[in-house]
Image (cartoon, helix red, strand yellow):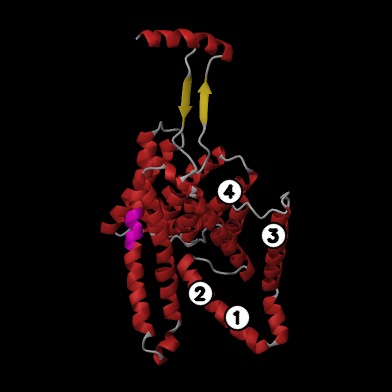
Amino acid sequence: MTAIAAASERVTGKLGDQTLLFQYTIKLVLLISFLELVLYRLVSRLGMHLSKLAAEHEWIIPTFTALTEIGQWLLNAVAILLFLGLGVAILNRAVGRSMNGFDKITVPCIALLLLLTVGFLFVPPTMLGSSIYNLVALVTLICLMTEYLSTHEERSHRAMGLTYLFGIGGWLYYQIVSTAYSFLGTVSAPPMVYEAHRVGEALMVLSSMLVFWAYGHGVSIRSRNQRQRRRAVWFWTTAVSIFVGMLFLDYLLDHYNSTMAANIRSGARGIGWIFQFGMGYTFYLPFAFYMAGLICWSYTVIKLLTMGRLAGYGIGLMFIAGYALLYSNLTLMVILGVMLLTMDRAKRESVESAPASSASMMGAPDSLVSGHV
């Protein structure tokens, strides 16, 4: 007779299903990385932009200096937590369950990235070391995203995953090829590096919008509930109106008041400069697209976090890291975020049992034997 065999994966879409150490590590990573983004990568750049006001107000320089020091402390804290989170994650993959084809590549690659990161603390990376580091990161992301695509069949999930992979891949290609050409000392221009950089940024912005399609359900006009349908119509009408208004805002202001339009352009360039140094976005696209991506990403992440979904923490880390991965901790943040995204899937159980009639016939003798014992 065929025995009843049940096989289940220790991979679910809830953070609460993981170990306590992993839960608190991921929560702290997301919180501290967000604070590091605001206090260090954005606010410190804002202080540099307020040099004229600093001459008039003495409190500006010490305030932003203190915020920068706090941000640097947070940067170190994020790095430590990323090491802990990735270490626990790859340990669970290597020991907690049987390693599949993807794990046999991703686990050694992530371990190599951690070792290289520690090694670069003692020996500064050369051009060759930077190229190897970014190449290993790209291979890891490809394997993780392939695993994500193989376990998520929804078109929205696959569109978001592929867009993000090609987006961040544009930056990694730019870094790998440019650094390799500089290391070789060739005078010829690297092929398609600037085009890949621009296309990658556009795909990153598009991916931040697609996360709403993939995970931000709840405002569909197809709902049968009339109240939800009215809310969805109001939401989409307002969102589209604001988006179109922002697209043509500069044109309308230029016709209304050219001086006001010039001041707004100057302020927009300052904001773009801050975000360029903080997250790597050059803002060559219309500003409305960046704002739409920020709103879609924020709504989706907040919704998923309230549900306790691993995807919320993963998507949060993926986009908090930004586009330009200038620091190793940002690269590790993207790796951990994509890994959390792959872990967010329904728990699958495969049960192989005998037919119902055979089970009922065999049930009585087993119970009788156990009763005599």
- Element at badge 4? helix
Please provide percent x and percent y for residue 269. Answer: 55, 77
Q: CA distance from mark 4 to mark 3?
A: 31 Å
Residue type, label 3 = Arg
Viewer-side label of 3, 2: 3
Say the numbered circle drawn on residue 273.
2
Residue appearing at x 36%, y 49% in the figure? 85
Q: Earlier in the sequence, mark 2 or mark 4?
A: 4
- Give the amino acid at mark 4: Leu
Q: Which mark is residue 231?
A: 3
Place of residue 83 in the rendered image (x, y in percent of width and height, measured from the top left): 34, 51
**Which residue position holds label 1?**
265
What is the spatial separation of the Cα atoms under label 1 and label 2, in whole angstroms? 12 Å
* Location of mark 4 (residue): 162
Q: Is residue 318 visible?
A: yes
Look at the image and give the residue range highlighted in magenta: 76-81
